[in-house]
Image: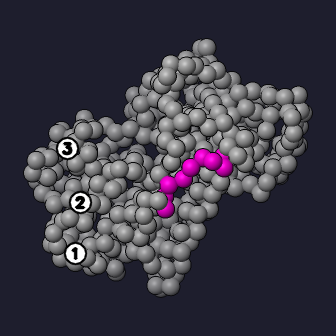
């Protein structure tokens, strides 16, 4: 067995005794024909799972890593709103797993996991075969609580799309926007917290408005929100007013924004207060929970999310199973692609140190999120987190949001940074 000392491991992570959850500059881990020290299966090839699989191999090539992902092409939710706005095409947000296999030695299997046996440490695949593991990482993403909205269902979402899993529904929503007559009303109905990508619905409003301003300028966007406030609200509202004056209206939950019923035939949303809102295009985003596999594996709490040890992301329900990304309860960290990427690295380090029998360094976690209001108008939020009394909490004074009173050139630079951010994180995850 190749020996990996604590000192060597700290040097690999970036040194100084602290694990910084950011891209690493290269591996100095032992290479060559290392004897395997363990088998790790990672299920789910998004920002959390793909990152974890890659960094397990970067941190310690003596670990056998298998990534199980149903799709050969992963479509990112980040930048999917740009597809709606006509700024990007679907091909621009699709990524494969070839480099994870060829450059990092990750075994990639395109199938689904139908069951988990935490006692025998085995997963069952769609064809009935089983694979054993020493550690299992689940990054399954989200599912939807359709029953929270009367009249809505998974089948109904094919025609009244949520488009909150980028792919076919993104194209459906885009087609509906393009066939809508000028002067139509687009309704976006975001759910209450917690949900995937807190700024996402409001960026979507800006991207749809960008398309409408060019092609259907008489149209309106109505946001019916279950919440009383939302991420980066002052910046979004100032941007809407500057770029799309009078086009976007936001209604908060207590004033009729919380939707409890859908009349699909008439494209009408009915609020908790009984208000009826008819749209020409309706984008209804239901409340969310961890994806089905997390429930099947018995990893969720009564709210539908997965409690974990937030230092290692090991489940507090089942040992030797880690949950990362949107499905996990991760303290103050939002459910975002960058959070999942950060968690994937911390989880990989936790597994390596566990298998090697060395102590896990103190970890820090990061999140950065850019949002476009128009192609030349970007805003952002960034935060750094540390573990405090077992919970991931904000580091006071670190990060922050874009300043309010800046000129157009500043906003344009932020939009350019958004493109750079996307290129960087997708390369770090899939490259």
Query: For the point 39% across and 51% down, which residue is it?
Result: 167
Query: For the point 49% across and 31% down, which residue is it?
Result: 112
| Labels 3 and 2: the sequence-earlier one | 2
User: Which residue carries the number 2 mark?
Assistant: 176
Question: Disc 2 on helix, strand or loop?
Answer: helix
Query: For the point 54% across and 53% down, which residue is it?
Result: 95
| Labels 3 and 1: the sequence-earlier one | 1
Left or right of 38? Residue 394 is: left
Residue 255, percent from left and from top: 19, 56
| Labels 2 and 1: the sequence-earlier one | 2
Left or right of 295? Residue 191 is: left
Q: Is residue 297 magenta?
A: no
Q: Is residue 297 visible?
A: no
Q: Depth-wise, is mark 3 or mark 2 nearer the camera?
A: 2
Boundaries of the magenta span: 92-100
- As rendered, which of 257 and 213 lies closer to the eye? 213
Residue 424, percent from left and from top: 62, 62
Q: Is residue 99 magenta?
A: yes
Q: Residues within 10 Å of mark 2 (few under 14, many from 20)?
A: some
Distance between mark 3 and mark 2 Cα atoms:
23 Å
- As rendered, which of 153 and 333 lies closer to the eye? 153
User: Which residue carries the number 3 mark?
Assistant: 260
Distance between mark 3 and mark 1 Cα atoms:
30 Å
Here the colouring is: one colour
Q: Quadrant of the C terminus?
A: bottom right
User: Which residue carries the number 1 mark?
Assistant: 216
Disc 2 vs disc 1: Cβ atoms closer than 8 Å?
A: no
Q: Is residue 79 above or below residue 168?
A: below
Distance between mark 2 and mark 1 Cα atoms:
13 Å
Question: Disc 3 on helix, strand or loop?
Answer: strand
């Amino acid at each position: 067995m190749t020996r990996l000392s604590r000192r060597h491991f700290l040097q690999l992570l970036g040194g100084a005794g602290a694990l910084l959850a950011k891209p690493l500059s290269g591996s100095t881990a032992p290479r060559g024909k290392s004897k395997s020290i363990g088998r790790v299966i990672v299920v789910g090839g998004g920002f959390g799972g793909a990152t974890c699989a890659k960094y397990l191999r970067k941190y310690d090539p003596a670990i056998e890593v298998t990534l199980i992902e149903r799709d050969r092409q992963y479509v990112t939710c980040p930048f999917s709103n740009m597809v709606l706005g006509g700024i990007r095409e679907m091909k621009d947000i699709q990524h494969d797993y070839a480099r994870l296999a060829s450059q990092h030695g990750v075994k990639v299997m395109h199938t689904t996991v139908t069951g988990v046996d935490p006692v025998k440490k085995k997963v069952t695949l769609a064809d009935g075969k089983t694979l054993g593991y020493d550690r299992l990482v689940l990054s399954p993403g989200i599912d939807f609580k359709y029953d929270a909205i009367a009249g809505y269902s998974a089948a109904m979402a094919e025609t009244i799309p949520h488009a909150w899993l980028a792919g076919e529904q993104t194209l459906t929503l885009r087609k509906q926007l393009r066939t809508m007559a000028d002067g139509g009303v687009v309704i976006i109905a975001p759910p209450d917290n917690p949900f995937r990508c807190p700024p996402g619905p409001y960026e979507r409003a800006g991207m749809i408005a960008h398309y409408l301003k060019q092609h259907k300028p008489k149209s309106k966007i109505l946001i019916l929100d279950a919440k009383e406030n939302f991420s980066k609200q002052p910046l979004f509202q100032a941007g809407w007013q500057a770029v799309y004056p009078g086009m976007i209206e936001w209604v908060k939950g207590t004033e009729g924004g919380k939707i409890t019923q859908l009349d699909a035939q008439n494209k009408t949303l009915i609020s908790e207060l009984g208000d009826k809102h008819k749209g020409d295009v309706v984008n209804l985003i239901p409340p969310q929970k961890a994806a089905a596999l997390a429930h099947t594996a018995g990893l969720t709490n009564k709210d539908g999310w997965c409690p974990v040890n937030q230092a290692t992301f090991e489940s507090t329900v089942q040992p030797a199973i880690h949950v990362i990304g949107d499905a996990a309860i991760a303290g103050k960290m939002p459910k975002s692609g960058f959070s999942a990427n950060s968690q994937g690295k911390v989880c990989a380090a936790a597994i390596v140190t566990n298998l090697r029998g060395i102590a896990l360094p103190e970890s820090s976690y990061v999140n950065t999120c850019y949002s476009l209001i128009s192609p030349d108008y970007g805003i952002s939020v960034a935060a750094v987190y540390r573990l405090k009394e077992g919970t991931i909490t904000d580091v006071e004074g670190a990060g922050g949001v874009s300043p309010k009173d800046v000129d157009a050139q500043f906003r344009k630079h932020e939009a350019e940074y958004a493109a750079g951010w996307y290129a960087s994180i997708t390369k770090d995850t899939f490259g």
